[in-house]
C-alpha cells in the first residue's frame, strides 16, 4: 500500500483516528450572511473521511469578521447552522469535526463588522487591503483592547467554543497563526502593550495562553487544538525573535493536554524547522501543515510520520479539490487539480462539484 504510515491508525488520550490525514482549515466565503447552510453541510460531509476535519476560520465575535460570507459562531442562528454541518458530517463519515476560531483582530474590517472599528493588541493598522464587493479597501487603524476588555475577548472565544460543542463538533482549533488576533499578540510589530501583555516574550505569549486555558477550562483540553505559524509574515506580521517566542510558548503549553498542536512548517520564514521545534518541546499530538515548498508532498509526510517527527498531516488544497482524498491516496489514484479561481467565490462551482474517484471512474 502506498503511504503505509499515513494509513496507520492513531491513538493518544481521547483522540483516535483511523489514519493520519487531516483537512487543513480553508476559508471559502460561502456561508451566506455568516450562517452555515445546506451547501456548506454538503461540502463538509463530502470530506468526512478526513481524520480531523478542521473547518474554515470562524469568527467568535462580530467584530472579528474580516471577509465576505465567512461563518461566525457567536449567535444562535450560526450555531444552528453549524449543528446542521455537524449532523451531515457525522452521518457521512468518522471525521472529528473541529471548528477553527479565527478572530481577525486588526485585519477585520468595518465593512464586515457592521461599522465597528476592529480591535487589536495595539492601535497599529496592517499594511494592506482587503477585498470587499465595493472594491479593495485599506485596513483601518484598530482600537486597542484595554486591559479590562481582554476578559471580554477571552470570553468570546469561550462562548464560541461552548457553542461549537453544543452544535455537535468534536472541538475547536484556536487560530494563533497567519497574522490573526492571537498571532497579533505574539508579534512585536503588532503588540506594543505595556500592561503585562506585551513588552517581552513572556508578555506577548500571555493572552494567547490565557485564551487556551480559558477555552480548555470550558470544554476540556481534549477538545481544543491550537494552530501556529512561527515567523510567518502573512497579514503584515514581523514577530521579532521567533525562536525565543515559540520556545517560551511551547514550554508553557506543554503541561496543557490539548487535543493537538497544528504547526505550519514555516522554515523559510523562521530560519529553522518549526516542526522540529514543536516536536522537541510539545509532548502531545502534532499535526503538520505546510504550503511553502513542494517538498512537503505526500511521500514526505509519510516519511515524517514513519520517523516519528509528526503524528498527522493536514492538507488544505489537496482536500479542497479531492473530497475523497484518503481513498485516492490509499488507491494511488490521480488527484484532481484545485481551481484557484473558485477558492474564495463561485457558489457550488469549485466547492461541491469536485468528483470523487468513483464518480470519475463511473463517468469514464
Ligand atoms: C483557499 C484557502 C483558504 C484558507 N483559509 C484558511 C483559514 O481559514 N484558516 C487557516 O488557518 N488557514 C487557511 N488557509 C491556509 C491553509 O490551511 C494551509 O495552511 C495552506 O493552504 C497550505 O497548505 P496546503 O499546501 O495543504 O494547501 C487557507 C488556504 C487557502 C488556499
Image: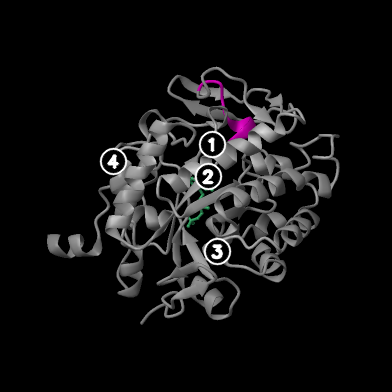
Whether 175 is drawn above or below 103: the answer is: below
How far from the left and from the top, in percent, is residue 179? 63, 42
- Residue ID at (76%, 62%): 251
N-terminal-most mark, 1 or 4: 4
Element type at mark 3? strand
The quarter of the picture where residue 19 lies is: bottom left
Please tell me how crowded label 4 is: few (under 14), some (14-19), or many (20+) other residues with Cα within 10 Å: some
How far from the left and from the top, in percent, is residue 168? 40, 50
Question: Label 2, label 3: how many angstroms apart (C-alpha)?
Answer: 20 Å
User: Which residue is the site of mark 4?
Assistant: 39
Question: Label 1, label 4: how many angstroms apart (C-alpha)?
Answer: 21 Å
Question: Label 2, label 4: how many angstroms apart (C-alpha)?
Answer: 23 Å
How far from the left and from the top, in percent, is residue 345? 37, 36
How far from the left and from the top, in percent, is residue 357? 24, 64
Question: Label 4, label 3: how many angstroms apart (C-alpha)?
Answer: 28 Å
User: Which residue is the site of mark 2?
Assistant: 161
N-terminal-most mark, 2 or 3: 2
User: Which residue is the site of mark 1?
Assistant: 60
Amino acid at each position: 500500500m502506498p503511504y503505509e504510515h499515513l494509513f496507520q491508525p492513531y491513538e493518544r488520550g481521547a483522540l483516535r483516528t483511523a489514519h493520519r490525514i487531516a483537512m487543513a482549515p480553508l476559508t471559502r466565503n460561502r456561508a451566506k450572511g455568516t450562517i452555515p447552510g445546506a451547501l456548506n453541510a454538503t461540502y463538509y460531509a463530502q470530506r468526512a473521511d478526513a481524520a480531523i476535519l478542521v473547518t474554515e476560520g470562524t469568527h467568535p465575535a462580530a467584530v472579528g469578521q474580516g471577509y465576505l460570507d465567512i461563518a461566525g459562531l457567536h449567535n444562535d442562528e450560526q450555531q444552528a447552522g453549524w449543528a446542521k454541518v455537524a449532523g451531515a458530517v457525522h452521518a457521512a463519515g468518522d471525521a472529528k469535526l473541529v471548528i477553527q476560531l479565527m478572530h481577525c483582530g486588526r485585519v477585520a474590517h468595518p465593512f464586515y463588522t457592521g461599522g465597528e472599528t476592529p480591535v487589536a493588541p495595539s492601535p497599529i493598522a496592517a499594511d494592506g487591503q482587503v477585498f470587499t464587493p465595493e472594491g479593495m479597501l485599506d485596513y483601518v487603524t484598530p482600537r486597542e483592547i484595554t486591559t479590562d476588555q481582554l476578559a471580554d475577548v477571552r470570553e468570546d472565544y469561550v462562548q464560541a467554543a461552548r457553542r461549537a460543542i453544543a452544535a455537535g463538533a468534536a472541538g475547536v482549533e484556536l487560530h494563533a497563526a497567519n497574522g490573526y488576533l492571537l498571532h497579533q499578540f505574539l508579534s512585536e510589530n503588532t503588540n506594543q502593550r505595556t500592561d503585562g501583555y506585551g513588552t517581552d516574550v513572556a508578555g506577548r505569549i500571555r493572552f494567547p495562553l490565557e485564551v487556551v486555558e480559558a477555552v480548555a477550562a470550558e470544554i476540556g483540553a481534549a477538545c481544543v487544538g491550537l494552530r501556529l505559524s512561527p515567523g510567518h509574515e502573512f497579514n503584515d506580521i514581523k514577530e521579532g525573535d521567533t525562536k525565543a517566542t515559540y520556545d517560551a510558548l511551547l514550554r508553557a503549553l506543554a503541561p496543557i493536554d490539548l487535543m493537538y498542536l497544528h504547526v505550519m512548517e514555516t522554515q523559510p520564514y523562521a530560519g529553522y524547522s518549526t516542526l522540529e521545534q514543536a516536536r522537541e518541546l510539545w509532548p502531545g499530538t502534532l499535526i503538520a501543515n505546510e504550503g511553502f515548498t513542494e517538498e512537503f508532498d505526500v511521500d514526505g509526510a509519510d516519511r515524517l510520520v514513519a520517523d516519528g517527527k509528526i503524528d498527522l498531516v493536514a492538507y488544505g488544497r489537496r482536500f479542497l479539490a479531492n473530497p475523497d482524498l484518503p481513498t485516492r491516496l490509499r488507491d494511488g489514484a490521480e488527484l484532481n487539480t484545485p481551481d484557484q479561481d473558485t477558492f474564495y467565490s463561485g457558489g457550488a462551482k469549485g466547492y461541491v462539484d469536485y468528483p470523487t474517484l468513483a464518480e470519475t471512474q463511473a463517468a469514464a
